Amino acid sequence: MSILTKARPAAGVTPPAGGRGGHQKGDRRRRALGKNPIGLLLSAPYLIFVLAVFAWPLVFAVWMSFHEYFFAAPGAQIDRPFVGLDNFREVLGDPDVIRSFGNVGIFLIINVPLTVVLSLVLASALNKAVRFRTFLRVGYFVPYITASVAVVGVWLFLFSGSGLVNQILGPLAPEPSWLINSQWAMPTIALFVTWKQLGFFILLYLAALQNVSQELYEAAATDGAGKVRSFFSVTIPGVRPATVLVLLLSTVTGANLFTEPYLLTGGGGPNGASTSPVLLMYQRGIEQGSPDVAAAIGVLLVIGVLIIAFIQRKVAGGDES
């Protein structure tokens, strides 16, 4: 009874201003702005950039894919009726679109595993105290920062009919040559992209290897594990979060393939054997003036990438990392 008496305010006494209501408002404000509101302020420019460059175009592309959309003069009032799934039916019934998705599937099957394996192995080697380590790190990273137009000329020289690769292979070289061969055009592009972007993924793995404790390697060596066993038992589990990131980034990069087939094979040749969905979006939307069809291709591509990324995350153990 005494406790209740102490807790009850005296008659005629007004509770202090900003009591429970003030605390509730303060709690709501902290939940909305976070513990450090200045962080929200500093991240606002990048959030605006993401919304303007990525989110809004994606929403607009989804809207376009369900309407009959075409380019018109600025300020012109044009009726763009809702057509439902007609654009998607046209896309799924187009053999060129189906082939472009098959081409990028071939690309991903070659590029993603090669990227993960080579970047992890090379990063593990460069993480050791080897001679010329800094030179090798820079050497692997230079192709990544070099413009594609510059390095494409080198690959055209190497893989042309009279190029260095065919001269080395001699009678084993394919006929017709690599980039004009319907069977070898996309695998050659996949090798080119793997080589060009390898330095970036090596840096990701090098950063991840810094967080793997040396005590784990010492414990593995004490148990009698050699270098190969330590690599599979210590290194690979230790860099699992980086592996999930590499899988995701290489998949997204491959799905957005455009520059390489455009430059190496003259726009998806021979006969569409190296056409990617993004290149086909450019051809349908810009060259042929059907942006609604191009938007439908893009929506299907986004859905496909999300499904692949979800499967990769589950298989690679992204939830655990």
Image: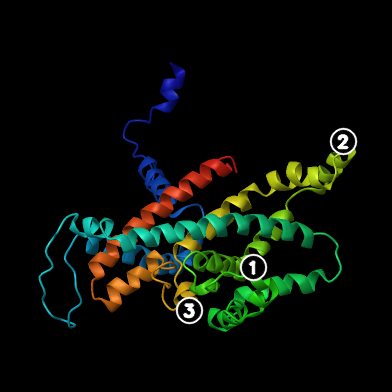
Give coordinates of residue 242: x percent, y percent: 62, 53
Q: Kindly give the residue lying farthest to the top in the view shown.
A: 1
Q: Which amino acid does the dot numbered 1 rest on?
A: Leu
Mark 3 or mark 1, which is nearer to you? Answer: 1
Residue 204, relative to residue 17: is it above or below? Answer: below
Give coordinates of residue 285: x percent, y percent: 28, 72
Tell me if 265 is positioned left or right of 18 in this view: right
Q: Which amino acid does the dot numbered 3 rest on?
A: Leu
User: What residue is shown with label 1?
Assistant: 172
Callout 2: few (<14), some (14-19), or many (20+) C-alpha neighbours within 10 Å?
Answer: few
Q: Which mark is residue 263?
A: 3
Q: Which quarter of the rendering shows the N terminus?
A: top left
Callout 3: few (<14), some (14-19), or many (20+) C-alpha neighbours within 10 Å?
Answer: some
Picture quadrant of residue 98: bottom left
What SS does tag 3 mark? Answer: helix
Mark 1 or mark 2, which is nearer to you? Answer: 1
Q: Kindly give the residue lying farthest to the front in the view shown.
A: 171
What residue appears at the point 29 percent right and 71 percent down from the top-left corner?
284
Question: In the depicted view, which residue is nearer to us: 123 or 187?
Answer: 187
Tell me if 166 is positioned left or right of 104 in this view: right
Picture quadrant of residue 94: bottom left
